[in-house]
Image (cartoon, rainbow, N blue to C red):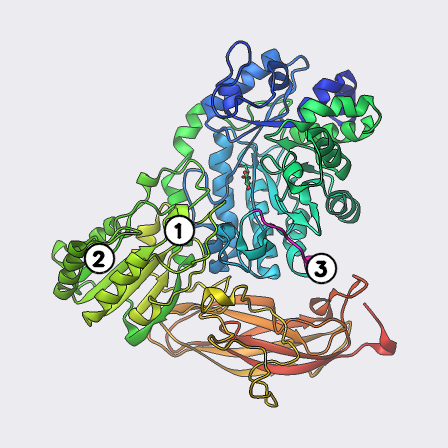
Amino acid sequence: MTTSTIHHLLNQMTVKEKIAQLLQLAGPFYKGSNQQGQITGPMADMPITKDHILNSGSVLGVSGAAEVISIQQKHLEENRLGIPLLFMADIVHGYKTIFPVPLAIGCSWDLDLAKQSAEIAAKEAAVSGVHVSFAPMVDLVRDPRWGRVMESTGEDPYLNSLFGQAFVKGFQKEDLTRDFESVASCVKHFAAYGAAEGGRDYNTVDISERQLRESYLPAYKAALDAGCEMVMTAFNTVDGIPATGNKELMRDLLRDEWGFDGVLISDWGAVKEMIPHGVAEDEKEAAKKAILAGLDIEMMTACYAQHLEELVEQGEVDLKLLDEAVIRILTLKEKLDLFNHPYRGASIEAEKEIVGHADHRKISRELAAKSTVLLQNQNQTLPLDQNQKIALIGPFADSFDLLGPWAGVGVKEEAVTLEKALKDHLSEDNLIRSQGCSIEKITQSQLDEALHAASEADVVVLAVGESSSMSGEANSRTNIQLPQAQLELIEAVAKTGKPVVTILFNGRPLDLHGVVEHSDALLEAWFPGSEGGNAIADLLYGKINPSAKLSMSFPYNVGQVPVYYNHFNTGRPKGAPDAQEHYVSDYMDSPNAPLFPFGFGLSYTQFAYDQFELSAEELTLDAEIKASIRVMNTGSYSGDEIVQLYIRDISGEIVRPMKELKDFVRISLEPGESKTVHFSIKEEQLRYHHKDLSFSSDAGKFEVFVGTNSQENHSQFFTLTKKGGQKL
Ligand code: BGC
């Protein structure tokens, strides 16, 4: 089908049929609809008729080849013009083979593996009938109270952009039209959903346009530059206007400025939510605002379906806007080749073979190991020795709750638990098991038994954390410590004097008081996915040396939040040489620094940095400076180090962050080996949004930092010179 045939099809469509293309309904409307098209169950009160359903454009949350084929077949029989449905679903970190949660993947700093994880997710989803994945979620996050931080890759615009691109390329591969192992990608949630006030889900977002452009927008833009086909709007307001009715965001920025011509979809129910937000009196006004602002598909409310026809008849909405939205949706169907192959990759046979394939689990295992961050390792407690007798204690020791939220059709019970993995590694005599407590409760007898187990062992492995229902959508928390029961367990076990290795399973950076001081070694495993237990065992026994680095800061306490590495200095920074004693920007009862900063993560080996050199002290517009540093493995294990480069603009037109990540590189070093790492610094890396929103750099002094994390690094200065006040 070509542009002209899409127009030909459009010309045959009635206004009602066009509007129905803009409607997205969940599976139960198709599966649960009886002859009369009546819906039973919780969605029964949606004003949807059989007519709406058989003309609708897309389905949400249905997968499985048999199911998709049957719905599509029935739809094609009944739909007057034979327009196929689009099947969309949340394939966030895997379909059936579940990878670590995105925040964990962010800590891998491994773009190739991230891309591979999306490719596998796409392959499994596509063969199960899915056409579009509602991912990646690239919302920048600074507030661990927000339950959805686990869906993001973290707090840095640059890193998030790279991951956003990697995921899009993995999902969509090279050619959506010919390669049916791909799915179209829908980046979300546009815009700045991660900046919800107080970390409370769905809450107000109010940030300056400059900050929006500098920190929050780059990752969406990067995803679109990588070819992402769709954008989902956010639930929140941006500068007082709900994103779903926000013309500045959709028509002005996305469409006009960035040239995005793909499909824009609302989040679940977000069109109707303009009423409680307080910008629409009723559904009709909500529908009008959404279409005028540029929204194409309305997910799970029926404001368009109910009112758009009348709005067009009354001349309040130009038919042209409706036509444009329909054309975009039909064009996406065409790109996915649905007019020729309405079932696309869906295959009942191939599905059995591909979904959950052992090769996919292998990659999941590798990625989980690369995403697990070693936060502490006193006295080289880790790696463990197979001859040591370990007491495995805690609610996550045998828990299947390893997949985390948004786990596709992943089956918890198919995940490898830590206990199962350790049993494969150890002789029976060397593994003592005790429950210790549940996620939120502890009894005296559990505690007694745990202490007894600890006393029998050489080392204690404590598997603790938050259940997956404590993070994810609508799961914000003001207390981000581990539940009290687990803190009691940890403290009591530590008192036995046995070395304690604590493994954390959770979806957000936690306040680790009560954990760090009682742990000799501390591994942050996040929700590691289907192969979690195996990956952790690989790390515990040194088969793999940890290399992950935090992509989101761990606060010292919740009162510091938001705490992130790329903050401003203030006029009264703490610790400056001439700082006053009292009137500085700090807390009376807490340090300013997070407990573990962005970029932080240990290895079983040690890396020493020296010989930091810049090739020049002056940077001109057409040249570059080479920054080089020698990294030496001074420990006794081979290992990978992620060498990070940050820059600070010392004096800008606008205050610039203390540091901004600009580049990084992974190197592998054998014990005693050293390598010199080279980075190049160019003027374009120094640009930012000025007061007039122009994107340019300032001539003047810059500081460049290279090192092992955002706090520990070597630094030097250079100057950017521009002839005749040249602005770029
Ligand atoms: C979430 C989205 C998701 C959608 C569809 C919403 O509640 O915010 O991220 O894509 O549901 O499942």
With 186 as the anchor, is 621 left or right in this view?
Answer: right
Quarter of the rendering containing residue 503: bottom left
Q: Which residues are magenta?
A: 202-212
- Can residue 265 be seen here? The reply is no
Residue under numbered circle 3: 208
Residue at 76% from the left image edge and 70% from the top image edge:
697
Residue at 38% from the left image edge and 44% from the top image edge:
361
Q: Sort mark 1 into few (<14), some (14-19) or many (20+) by Cα contacts within 10 Å.
A: many
Element type where label 3 sits in the image: loop
Q: Sort mark 2 into few (<14), some (14-19) or many (20+) by Cα contacts within 10 Å.
A: many
Residue under numbered circle 1: 527
> In the rendered structure, which amino acid carries the disc numbered 1?
Phe
| Total numbered circles | 3
> In the rendered structure, which amino acid carries the disc numbered 2?
Leu
Cα separation, mark 2 vs mark 1, equals 18 Å
Front residue (pair 653, 346): 653
- Can residue 45 be seen here? The reply is yes
